């Protein structure tokens, strides 16, 4: 039995790059040492494939592997059964995604066809790729830094166009550039600090002596290039502030519809979903438990939940449904509270707002949007003590304004605003953090720089300050992969899907 593989070798690997399912096409990706030679051994036109330049296509058939050594001159042996007709995209290192020779084989979609091609490749000598191994090789061969490598999986997992655009920004290098610029600021400060440390106290000229700015007074604790370190700190703080924004566009938010029975929650849920998922009747209490679905509003993936009506009820089943609704409300990122326009604002409605905020100007513990539903039948005549949007689930009145308000409320809660609506790295919009790993390392770098500046303010010795600046530089190096360990890399790439 062959020992299990690990990341870091250059063996020829193959993996499905598309789902193994019925489809028009399937793609199988290969890379590694002798990848093209092994592919040619199961291809109907081996000589043409081996002579093909990089970034070209070759048409032919995948065949059963030969039973013996290849025929003289590389010609195909008679009697080999055809498996599938394919197009092979040829890539030659270093001008390829992985930096190695490889090929993408486009065969007919369908489980049997794709499996047949894969079995032929494995019989020829290819190994099953590990999760994320193609991207790992791209990183190891200098084709991507770690921020770009992580953005590959962000792009695969993107749920909306905006999430995709932000991942593409990082794939294009927006975060890498920002990290390297901040790192350069800290390296300059560290270099100046270590220059001071190269002098003994006796060697330093007295204050006021013209010696390139170095004197004993400064060496006693004044941080060289302080402005650069302060600028680096501010840029690190700005990056940290983008994490919640980027997570909103990447992972989405939970928005919960709440209100009394028959207020129109289920109708509004179906309208926003554009399909009939919740049962809608004129009988109060129809929804006994919550139901949810994913939608996209304003470029934000939203998990929208329709809940049981909140009211006093003797029905034990209804009470269980309301308990579950309240648990969901506690977890919500945004609450859409539906007011029945035909019934007006009741004491139960006011009790809800007293609990979740929004009355008498106090700050709500989480964003709450109040919707005056059935506005087509009963327009809002008098404003209550909190903002209300007039809507109608029946006619669609106020729905465009509602979707805009939902997006604005979630972005505000995540610390995003109008300046963040562009792509990361464009104009005033800072590059965004894509993963928790990046956020933690940026926090570590920021804390180190902050402590270094505090020590400098207290005029502590520079030999206490220099290690902190070095820690900040190394933390940023871990983000891009300039500083890394095999264990960290293997853990990170093992979370990727196979074929990436």
Image (spheres, rainbow, N blue to C red):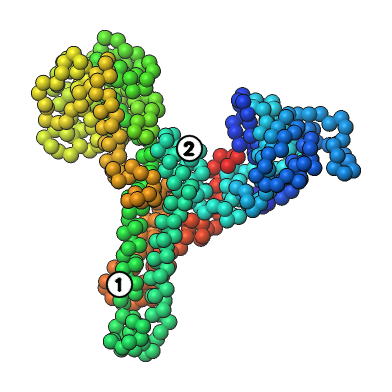
Pointer 1: residues within 10 angstroms few (<14), some, or many (20+)? many
Q: Is residue 340 visible?
A: no
Asked if 252 appears above or below 272 in the picture, the reply is: below
Residue extending furthest toward the right: 72
Name which residue lies at 60% across and 33% down.
Answer: 18
Secondary element at tag 2: helix
Name which residue lies at 67% across and 31% down.
Answer: 107
Pointer 2: residues within 10 angstroms few (<14), some, or many (20+)? some
Left or right of residue 312: residue 271: right
Left or right of residue 81: residue 53: left
Pick whichever, 397 or 362, lies toward us. Answer: 397
Q: Position of residue 129 (x, y in %)?
A: 64, 42
Q: Position of residue 134 (x, y in %)?
A: 61, 46
Asked which quadrant contains residue 24, the reply is top right
Name which residue lies at 48% across and 40% down.
Answer: 155
Name which residue lies at 73% across and 44% down.
Answer: 52
Pick whichever, 440 or 318, lies toward us. Answer: 440
Asked if 394 appears above or below 101 in the picture, the reply is: above
Gap in angstroms between the C-alphas marked 2 and 1:
44 Å
Q: Which residue carries the number 1 mark?
A: 456
Left or right of residue 46: residue 456: left
The reply to whether callout 2 and callout 1 are in contact (CB within 8 Å) is no
Pick whichever, 226 or 177, lies toward us. Answer: 177
Q: Position of residue 28 (x, y in %)?
A: 65, 36
Q: Which residue carries the number 2 mark?
A: 157
Q: Image quadrant for the C terminus?
A: top right
């Amino acid at each position: 039995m062959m020992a299990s593989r690990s990341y870091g070798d250059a063996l020829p690997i193959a993996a499905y790059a598309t789902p193994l399912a019925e489809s028009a096409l399937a793609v199988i990706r290969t890379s590694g040492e002798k990848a093209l030679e092994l592919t040619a051994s199961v291809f109907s036109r081996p000589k043409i494939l081996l002579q093909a330049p990089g970034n070209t296509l070759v048409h032919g058939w995948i065949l059963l592997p030969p039973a013996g050594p290849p025929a003289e001159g590389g010609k195909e042996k008679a009697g080999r059964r055809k498996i599938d007709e394919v197009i092979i995209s040829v890539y030659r290192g270093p001008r390829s995604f992985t930096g190695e020779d490889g090929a993408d084989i486009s065969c007919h979609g369908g489980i049997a066809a794709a499996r047949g091609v894969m079995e032929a490749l494995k019989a020829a000598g290819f190994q099953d790729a590990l999760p994320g191994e193609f991207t790992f090789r791209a990183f190891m061969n200098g084709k991507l830094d770690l921020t770009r490598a992580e953005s590959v999986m962000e792009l695969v997992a993107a749920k909306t166009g905006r999430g995709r655009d932000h991942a593409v920004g990082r794939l294009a290098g927006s975060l890498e550039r920002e990290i390297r610029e901040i790192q350069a600021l800290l390296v300059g400060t560290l270099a100046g600090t270590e220059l001071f440390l190269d002098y003994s106290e006796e060697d330093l000229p007295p204050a006021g002596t013209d010696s390139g700015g170095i004197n004993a007074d400064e060496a006693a604790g004044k941080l060289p290039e302080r402005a650069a370190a302060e600028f680096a700190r501010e840029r690190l703080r700005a990056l940290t502030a983008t994490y919640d924004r980027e997570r909103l566009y990447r992972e989405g938010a939970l928005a919960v519809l709440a209100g009394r029975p028959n207020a129109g929650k289920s109708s509004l849920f179906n309208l926003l979903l554009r399909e009939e998922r919740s049962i809608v009747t004129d009988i109060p209490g129809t929804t006994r438990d919550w139901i949810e679905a994913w939608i996209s509003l304003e470029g934000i993936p939203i998990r929208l939940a329709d809940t049981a009506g909140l009211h006093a009820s003797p029905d034990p089943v209804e009470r269980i449904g309301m308990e579950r609704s309240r648990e969901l409300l506690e977890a919500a990122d945004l609450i859409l509270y539906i007011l029945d326009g035909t019934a007006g604002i009741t004491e139960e409605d006011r009790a809800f707002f007293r609990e979740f905020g929004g009355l008498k100007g106090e700050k709500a513990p989480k964003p709450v949007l109040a919707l005056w539903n059935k506005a087509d039948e009963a327009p809002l005549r008098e404003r209550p003590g909190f903002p209300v949007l007039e809507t109608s689930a029946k006619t669609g009145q106020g729905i465009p304004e509602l979707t805009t308000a939902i997006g604005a409320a979630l972005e505000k809660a995540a610390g995003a605003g109008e300046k963040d609506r562009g792509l990361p790295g464009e104009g005033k919009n800072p590059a965004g953090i894509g993963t928790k790993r990046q956020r933690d390392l940026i926090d570590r770098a920021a804390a180190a720089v902050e402590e270094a500046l505090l020590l400098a303010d207290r005029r502590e010795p520079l030999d206490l300050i220099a290690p902190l600046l070095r820690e900040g530089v190394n933390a940023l190096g871990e983000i891009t992969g300039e500083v890394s360990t095999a264990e960290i890399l293997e853990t990170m790439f093992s979370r990727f899907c196979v074929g990436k």
